Amino acid sequence: MNFLKKTVDRLEPTFSEGGKLSKLHSVFDGFKTFMFVPNTTSKSGVNIHDAIDSKRLMITVVIALIPALLFGMWNVGYQHFMAIGTEAGFWQQFWFGFLAVLPKLLVSYIVGLTIEFIGAQIKKEEIQEGFLVSGILIPMIVPVDTPLWMLGLATAFAVIFAKEVFGGTGYNIFNVALVTRAFLFFAYPTSMSGDKVWVRTRDAFWWGAGENVDGFTGATPLGQLATSNSADPIFHNILNQAIGFKEAFLGLIPGSIGETSTLAILIGALLLIITGVASWKTMLSVFIGGALTAFAFNQWGPDTAIANLPWYEHLVLGGFAFGAVFMATDPVTSARTETGKWIYGLLIGMMAIVVRVLNPGYPEGMMLAILLMNIFGCLIDYFVVQSNIKKRMKRISNK
């Protein structure tokens, strides 16, 4: 490690001002600070000196996402072999899913980081590290059959118009990964919904050869419930076998790559809470808001399958758990005051269930709920701060 550090230090003058490759200083600095803790410190004012910087925080989130990503890769293979009626072992299933998901990860990072590198060079600024998380989130929240060119186009749109135009990392008002999904959902709806996009049924891997399985249907549980003609909240796997809470909690269902396993997501949530990277208040309040709203629909809602779905099953279906843990807790776009986090999370959970139940055209609900509350995050904090100021002024005037 010392050898690598000395090599990087020896190359630094070449990329610094006056060096032969000074125009690539932002790129060099980005790689250097990614591999090593920066040794520069502020020289004036009141500052906290710590080895933990935003890159390390982002990497912690990436590590927390690994359980859901790995399970998603395996589930892609599991659903595939079940759909084509072929028995396969664990590693064969995982390898199939790995090859199907890897190109999406590469496209996401290559497109997003290229734009950020170019932007940093043009502005002569340091490369911002926010895309370390967005780059892995984007492939995890889309169907496995999303074409790579669509994913690349949507990623470019989100990075440019949902992030860079606002000033880059720390200034965006919308979650970049969710803007990517929203772009895909509204620009290419047939590739983001229905019963053909959630399970990769082709015999070949990601290069696109092979034929689709005839007569196959792989709708997600929420998609099945939203279009059901029955009032019974029953959903099935791709073999048309009725499944329930256990399968949904473990993630043995069709869905976006990283969103199916609530168990894997909660493992990541535990790491984020222990390290203090994400707010447990926001996570918990999302689940509370969703549970209360779903319970209310169970009691007084319309007599439909999605409205009759038990509140605890709502929390493990679709992207609800994933959104609560990794999206709603985004430190840039969410509320930051402690009271505001409770309000923000509650409203997200409530809105997600309302969208699911009352608008069958959007059976997921979580994406729209979080993007909507991104708009009001700062407003919630403003009212919380103003309320605290009024309380303090009242206490002073009563003395």
Image (cartoon, grey):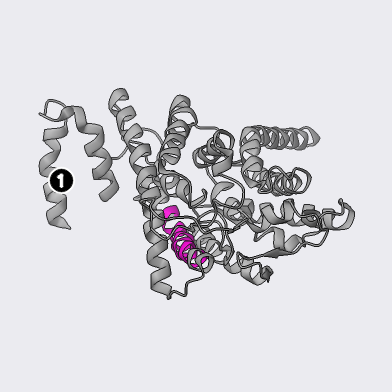
- Where residue 299 appears, as percent x and y from the top left, is 88, 57
Quadrant in the rendering for residue 44: top left
Mark yes or no: residue 39 visible: no
| Secondary structure category for the residue under label 1 | helix
The residue lying at 57 percent from left, 56 percent from top is 255
The kind of residue on which mark 1 rests is Val
- Image quadrant for the C terminus? top right
Q: Is residue 21 magenta?
A: no
User: Please, is residue 103 above or below residue 230 in the view?
Assistant: above
Residue that label 1 marks: 8
Q: Is residue 63 magenta?
A: yes
Magenta-drawn segment = 61-79
- Where residue 37 appears, as percent x and y from the top left, is 28, 49
> Would residue 234 be found to the left or right of residue 46 on screen?
right
Between 184 and 246, the residue placed more toward the observer is 184
The residue lying at 45 percent from left, 53 percent from top is 61
- Image quadrant for the N terminus? bottom left
> Would residue 57 be found to the left or right of residue 393 on screen?
left
Q: Residue furthest front?
A: 214
Mark yes or no: residue 60 visible: yes
